[in-house]
Amino acid sequence: MGSTGIGYEQQDYSVLITNKDTECAFQSTVSIIYSFSMCTYFIEELNGQSLEVAIAPNPVQGQLRLSVKGITRETRVAITDVSGQQQIFNATLPKYQQEYEQIIDFENLPSGLYLITFTSGNQTHAQKVIKTATK
């Protein structure tokens, strides 16, 4: 399975279902259309810097991997619930730290919408993260 991460892609699967009592079988092809565009993206302008951000998996059930490249100015990263009241994570990335990676545990958080906010100087950019129920 390969993806460029840009736009949508499609994969086709052949499914065969057999009733074990009657041995009656049914076969069909299923097409799955998907996009990984929510996992990696660019913040083109944040206080004079262009950041490459990877957030995976999104939606998340357990651990979320956050990766930021291209840091040239001090940047604050915060994760909050959608209301901004509950802070899940907070870090200040120093200028010229070219790459930053962090694993954030979402497992014990309630399902719902969370925001990752990047702030540098007086500019802010937010990205949604969806927490789904743990299986």
Image (tube, helix red, strand yellow):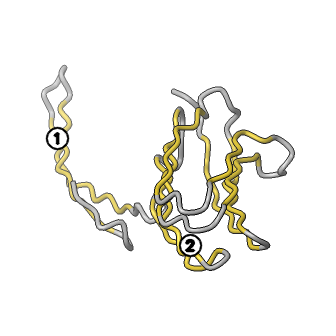
| Mark 1 to mark 2 CA distance (whole Å) | 44 Å
Task: Give me the disc on residue 16.
Answer: 1
Q: Position of residue 123 (x, y in %)?
A: 74, 73
The secondary structure type at the circle numbered 2 is strand
| Residue 28 falls left or right of residue 106 | left
Image: 19 above or below 87: above
Marks 1 and 2 in Cβ contact (< 8 Å): no
Q: Residues within 10 Å of mark 2 (few under 14, many from 20)?
A: few
- Please identify the quarter of the rendering in which residue 43 is found: bottom right
Kind of residue indicated by mark 1: Leu
Q: Where is residue 104 in the image (x, y as percent from the top left)?
A: 58, 37
Image: 50 above or below 25: below
Q: Position of residue 109 (x, y in %)?
A: 68, 32
Q: Which of 125 and 133 is in front in this view?
A: 125
Instruction: Please give the name of the residue rendered at 18% of the width and 22% of the height, measured from the top-left corner.
Output: 20
The secondary structure type at the circle numbered 1 is strand
Q: Which residue lies furthest to the right in this view?
A: 85
Kind of residue indicated by mark 2: Ile
Q: Which of 10 and 3 is in front in this view?
A: 3
What residue would you read off at disc 2?
43
Q: Which of 118 and 11 is in front in this view?
A: 118
Which numbered disc flags the more N-terminal residue, 1 or 2? 1
The count of marks equals 2
Instruction: Please give the name of the residue rendered at 61% of the width and 42% of the height, measured from the top-left corner.
Output: 131
| Residue 25 falls left or right of residue 116 | left
